[in-house]
Amino acid sequence: MTSIKCIITDDEPFARKGLQSYLEKIDFLELVAVCEDAVQLNTNIKQHAVDLIFLDIEMPYMTGIDFLKSAGNPPKVIFTTAYEQYALQGYELDVLDYLLKPISFDRFLKAANKAFDYFKSKQTGADDFMFIKAGNKLEKIRFNEIYFIEAMENYVSIYLGDKKLVAHSTLRNIQQQLPVSSFIQPHKSYLVNINAIQSIEGNILNIHQYQVPISKYQKEEVMERIVNNKLLDK
């Protein structure tokens, strides 16, 4: 795979220098910018193609967590922080890893390898499943078992063949883990597995016992995707 383009963001000069020295030792990581705060980071991700951010949490102007919540479609993130109490929020924001300062090189390398595996799987499409935290446990969900996913503010409901799971996540975070070739977004609040669609009536997708609406703005794209996938009987 090609190199992973990275940005380091930390308000501490010593921390920035340390992360940069680590990053330069790893051949599949490519440093494209170093930022002192979220304001500089916001500018840089608009100017550069970025895959991964090493992001501090406690910074002036805006915390790393607030930046991540406000960013429209941010790159993947590895948090770097001296405060372990943010670990749960990091998980909920779907970050790749959480590095606690002071960061040793072996722990940094482990996080870098995790990022490598993530981006490699995205390129090859090797994974056919994801893990979702529902209640107090992680649930392994195979993509082909999903009927559709419904957004409910800061939660999503994942409808499977025999059950429904509710997870604390956003629809966007879930969408980033799904194969683009198999899922469509017929409405701002829904993601649908194309292979689960049984019929279309007007602006309604019939998915087994469920019905999912199609937004008038998405109708043309949805119909094109379905026809191209040759799902419906002619």
Image (cartoon, grey):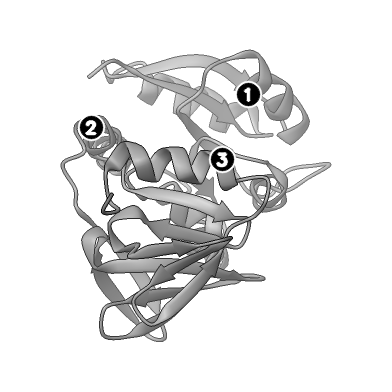
Residue, far right: 61
Residue type for callout 1? Ile
Q: CA distance from mark 1 to mark 2?
A: 21 Å
| Place of residue 171 in the rendered image (x, y in percent of width and height, measured from the top left) | 54, 59
Q: CA distance from mark 3 to mark 1?
A: 32 Å
Dividing the picture into quarters, in which one does residue 11 lie?
Answer: top right
| Residue at screen point 28% across, 36% down | 122
From the viewer's side, name the closer residue of 70 and 179: 179
Residue furthest out toward the left: 126
Marks 1 and 2, the one that precedes in the sequence: 1
Q: Position of residue 86 (x, y in %)?
A: 57, 63
Q: Which mark is residue 220?
A: 3
Amino acid carrying label 3: it is Glu
Q: On screen, 166 above or below 4? A: below
Q: Is residue 53 above or below residue 211?
A: above
In front: 59, or 117?
117
- For label 3, the SS is helix
Residue sitting at x 65%, y 14%: 47
Say whether residue 124 is left or right of residue 53: left
- The disc placed on residue 45 is 1
- In the shown orientation, is residue 177 left or right of residue 82? left
Question: Where does the image place residue 156, in percent across and percent down from the top left?
Answer: 52, 71
Q: Circle 2 sits on which residue? A: 120
Helix, strand or loop for disc 1: helix
